[in-house]
Amino acid sequence: MEGASPPPRRRVVMEGQVNPGRVVKMEVTDVRSAPARALAEALREAAIAIGAPDDFSPQVERPADPTHGDFASNAALVLSGRLGRPPRELAAELAEHLDLASTGVSDLAIAGPGFLNFSLSEDVLWAGLRSALESGADWGRSSAAEPLRYNVEFVSANPTGPLHVAHGRGAAIGDATAALLEWTGHEVKREFYVNDAGRQIELLGESIETRWLQARGVDLEMPQGGYQGEYIRDIAEELAGELGDARLEALERPERLNLLRARATDILRAGQARDLDAFGVHMDHWFDESSLFATGGVDGLLDRLTESGRAYRDDGAVWLRTTDLGDEKDRVLVKSDGSHTYFVSDIAYHLDKAERGFQRAIDVWGADHHGHVPRMQAALTALGLGEDFLEVLLIQLVTVMRGGEEVRMSKRAGQFVSLRDLFAETGPDVARYFFLMRRAEVPMAFDLDLALDTSDANPVYKVQYAHARMCSVFRRGEVDPECLAPTDADLAALGPGTERMVLTTVLRFPERVRAAARARAPYQICNYLEELAGAVNAWYHEGNLDASRRLLAEGPSRPGRLALARAVQLTLGSGLKLLGISAPERLEREGE
RNA sequence: GCGCCCGUAGCUCAAUUGGAUAGAGCAUCUGGCUUCGGACCAGAAGGCUGGGGGUUCGAGUCCCUCCGGGCGUACCA
C-alpha cells in the first residue's frame, strides 16, 4: 500500500530479482513461497553477520495488518533476548546487512517494537496474478507435501427419523471439511455410518407397531423411549397399505416387528439420502453397522480383546479395561442380555476403516458425544492404530431463531426443526453457508430473519453478488474472461490503493484454503470470502464516484482491471464451490 | 463433584494459532450519491477481551485460580 502508509520506508534498489516471463502456477504471498524462503535465508545471513549464533533461523510471517506489507520478520525481537540489545537497534543493523537481491522483495521498513516489514515487488505480484488466471478453475487448489487417504464420516443419523437442523450443520461442516482436504491434495471419501442395529432400531419397530395398532382401536401405550414424531404414524399407515393389515395381523409378533423395522428403516434412510442430496451432500459410501456383525468383524474384535486380556467377563457382561487407558471406569462391550453396545461396533467400525486402507479418519459428531472421544481414542491406540488416526470434530447445537424467539415446533417432525423444513424456506445455499460460517465448537443461533434477507446484509448474498457483479461486467463489456492475457504494463497501470488491496487479498486464497484445511475450519473460508467481497465492493463502487475508474472504462488501466476482475471472479467462484454453494452469474432482483 | 466446550463493541462474530493501535457486519449517529446492478459510499461513536494472578521482548491466545453459561458423566446411541 504505497502512499497510504505512514512509517518511513527505505527504497531498496533491486536488479533482476525475478523472471516474470516463465512463472506458471506460482504463489507469491505464502510464507512457504519462493520469495518468502529467499527472504528468510537473506535474513539469516544478515543476522549472522551482525553476531547471531549459527543456529539462528529467523521466521518470515505474514503481518495481520495488510498495510504492514506482504511479509514481516520478528528476527530483531528474538535476537534482542539472545544478544541483550534493543530490538530496534538490531532491526536497523539487520536492514543494513540485508541483501534483498533475488528475494522478490522491493521494500522494507522497520516498525513497531522492531519488526521488519517487507513488500513484494510489483513484478512478483503480477506474476502471481497471471498464475491465478492460468490456473483457472483450479485456482485455490494445492498439492500436499504428504498426501493422505482420509475417511470423513459425518451425519450418521440413526435411521429412526428425518434429519434435523443439527444434522444439517454436521452435513455442511463434514462436506466442506472433506472438500478442504481434497483441495489441499489429499484423497478423501465421504461416509455415512448407519446405526441399523441395536436398541434404537428395535424401538423404531415397536413404535411403528404401536401406532399401527392404535389406529385400529387397540388401547396401547407407546413403549418407554418410543418415537413420538408424527412421521411414525405416516410410516405405519404407509406400511399397512403396502403390506396389508391382514398379513401383518397373521404374523407372529417377532416376525412382524422384524418386518416393520426393516421396512421403516428403508423408508427413513431413503428420506435422509434424499434430503442430503437436495442439500448438495453426496456420500461415497453408506456403511451399515449390521454388516459388522454379518461379516464377523465384531466377533473377531471381541476375540482379540479377550485373548490380549483387555476384555473380561463380569456380571454376565463383557467389559473393556478402559481404566488402564485412563478412563474412570471400565466400559461394557457386550451387555448381560447378550446384545452389543454401540461402543464395540464403533471400535470394529474404525478398525474396518483402517483395514480399508484409510490413513486418517475424521468423525463429525454432535458435541453431546464428547465423553465418548477419549474412550474411542484409547481403544483404538490400544489396538495398534496411531494416535493421530482418529480425529473427532465436535459440532455444537443449533437453535433456529425467528423474530428473536427460538423456533421449536415443526408441523410434521415432532420436537425439532427438520433440515428439509429449514432449507425449504431458505434454500440450500443460504442454509449451508449459515451452518458453515461459525466455528463448529460454538453453539450457533441460526437467524432465520437474516437468512431470508436477500440484501447483502446477508453474507451469502454479499459474496454471491460480488461474484455476479464480476460476471455482469464481462457480459456488459462483451469480454471473454477466459481469454485475458495482461502484460506487465497492463498490470502496472493498476492503482496502488483499493486495487492493490483486492489483488493481495486474491493472491492469498490458496494459503487461506490450506490454513482452513489444517484447522478443519470451513468458517475461515467464509470469513475470507466476506473480506474479499467487501474489498471488491469498495473497488467496484469507486466507479460510482469517478466514471473513469469503472471496470469497463476505456483507457490504459482497463486491461489490468479486467484481469483483476477475472481473478476475483475465479476466487469467489472457487471459494463458493469449495463450500458447496452455487456461484450464480446473475442474481434476480426482488420484484423482477 | 469430575470432564469437555464457550465467555471479545448494544447484537452476531473475527483476530492467519504467541505479534504491532483487538477488527468486520448488523444496529445507532453525521454527511454524500439520477446507478458499469444503489441490494451504495465516506466518516463518527462504541472495549479493563468475565475477574484475579503467572510465564516473556510481547498474552484475547499458553499456565494456575475464581465467576458465569452449555453439554456430558448408562449394561442409550
Image (cartoon, coloured by chain):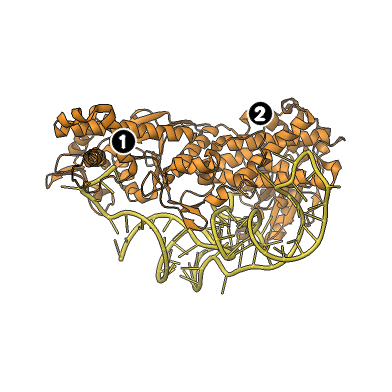
- Which element type, helix, strand or loop, lies under badge 1? helix
Residue labelled with disc 1: A235
Cα separation between marks 1 and 2: 49 Å
x then y, percent, for residue B14: 57, 53
Name the one closer to the observer, A411 or B13. A411
Q: Is residue A560 left or right of residue B61?
A: right
Quadrant location of the C terminus of chain A in the rendered image: top right
Q: Amino acid at mark 1?
A: Ile
| Residue A269 marker | none
Give residue A268's quadrant in the image: top left
Regarding residue A442, the answer to whether it shows in the image is no
x then y, percent, for residue A25: 66, 30
Please state the chain letter of the residue tagged with numbered disc 2 in the rendered image. A
Name the one closer to the observer, A335 or A455. A455
In the image, which lettered chain appears orange?
A
x then y, percent, for residue A323: 24, 51
Residue at x 67%, y 40% (from the top left corner): A589
Which hue belongs to chain B? yellow
- Which element type, helix, strand or loop, lies under badge 2? helix
Residue at x 74%, y 26% (from the top left corner): A480
Residue at x 49%, y 54% (from the top left corner): A401
Residue labelled with disc 2: A136
Q: Is residue A485 left or right of residue A278?
A: right
Task: State whether residue B50 is above or below residue A518.
Answer: below
Q: Amino acid at mark 2?
A: Gly
Numbered marks: total = 2
Give residue A38's quadrant in the image: top right
Task: State whether residue A503 is above or below residue A355.
Answer: below
Please state the chain letter of the residue tagged with numbered disc 1 in the rendered image. A
Q: Is residue A451 left or right of residue A407?
A: right
Regarding residue A417, the answer to whether it shows in the image is yes
